[in-house]
Every structure is written in structure tokens, then in C-alpha cells.
Image (cartoon, grey):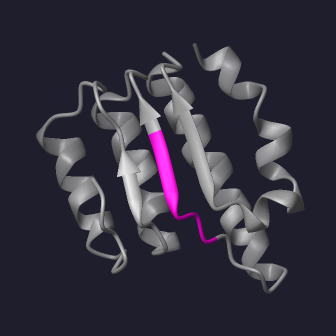
């Protein structure tokens, strides 16, 4: 659940994450709350990395079987659009429908090197 995502916060907020290229989180079951928390922390990391002149350029993002639904997908889409560096995104079995898919599609259009969905 979302409690597990809280365990990643310290790591994701650290400067060592400015160079993170792959984030693979499968079968977390973190739900919407965990997904929104992940999006918030990644967004903070991105902004802090910009201030350090080393923008977060995540290339691979995997979050499967994690019950993101539309709210979690929309929150993550905001971060994906900011970064613009994704090459691969895998998010199966998350219960994402029209609203979330629309937000993700918009974000993906801002990632010109995206090759794998």
C-alpha cells in the first residue's frame, strides 16, 4: 500500500536521484494515494535537480499492478510532461480509464524519445 511508497521518499528526495535513469516498481499495490505521493516526490526531485543544474532525466518508468486509477495516472502524467525524457513507460493493470489515459497521452507527447509503451 501507500506505506511502502513512504519508504522511498528519503531516497527519491536525495541528490543521488538527480541521475536516476530507471525506476521500476512492480506489483506495489500502492494505490492512488501512493501514486500521488510518488508523483509529488518525483516533481520535487525534478525541481531540485533543475536548481542544481542537473535535471532529472528519467528514461524508464515501470509501475505495474499498482491500482493507480485515473487520479494516480493524472498526477504521474504531470511529472512525465515536465521531464520530457522518457523512453519507456510500462503501467499495466492499473485501472486507468479515459481521464487518466488522456492525461498520460498528453504527457507522452512531450517525451519525443518515447519508444516503448
Q: Residue furthest left?
A: 98
Q: Residue at x 77, y 38 (%)?
A: 9
* Quarter where residue 91 is shown: top left
27 lies above or below 111: above
70 lies above or below 82: above
Instruction: Report x, y in % for residue 20.
Output: 71, 60
Q: Residue at x 76, y 72 (%)?
A: 49
Q: Residue at x 35, y 47 (%)?
A: 74
Instruction: Report x, y in % for residue 100.
Output: 24, 43
Q: In the drawing, does residue 64 fall left or right of residue 30?
A: left
Q: Residue furthest bottom?
A: 53
Instruction: Report x, y in % for residue 60.
Output: 50, 56
Q: How many marks?
A: 0
97 lies above or below 110: above
Say if the magenta span includes residue 61: yes
Q: Residue at x 52, y 37 (%)?
A: 36
Say if the magenta span includes residue 102: no
Residue range of the region highlighted in magenta in the rendering? 57-62
Q: In the drawing, does residue 76 fall left or right of residue 52?
A: left
Q: Quadrant of the N terminus?
A: top right
* Quarter where residue 67 is shown: top left
Amino acid at each position: 500500500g501507500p506505506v511502502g511508497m513512504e519508504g522511498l521518499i528519503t531516497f527519491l528526495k536525495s541528490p543521488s536521484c538527480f541521475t536516476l535513469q530507471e525506476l521500476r516498481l512492480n506489483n506495489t499495490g500502492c494505490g492512488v494515494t501512493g501514486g500521488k505521493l510518488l508523483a509529488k516526490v518525483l516533481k520535487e526531485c525534478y525541481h531540485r535537480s533543475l536548481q542544481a543544474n542537473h535535471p532529472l532525466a528519467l528514461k524508464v518508468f515501470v509501475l505495474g499492478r499498482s491500482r493507480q486509477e485515473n487520479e494516480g495516472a493524472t498526477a504521474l502524467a504531470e511529472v512525465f510532461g515536465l521531464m520530457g525524457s522518457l523512453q519507456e513507460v510500462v503501467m499495466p493493470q492499473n485501472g486507468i480509464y479515459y481521464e487518466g489515459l488522456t492525461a498520460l497521452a498528453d504527457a507522452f507527447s512531450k517525451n519525443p524519445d518515447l519508444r516503448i509503451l
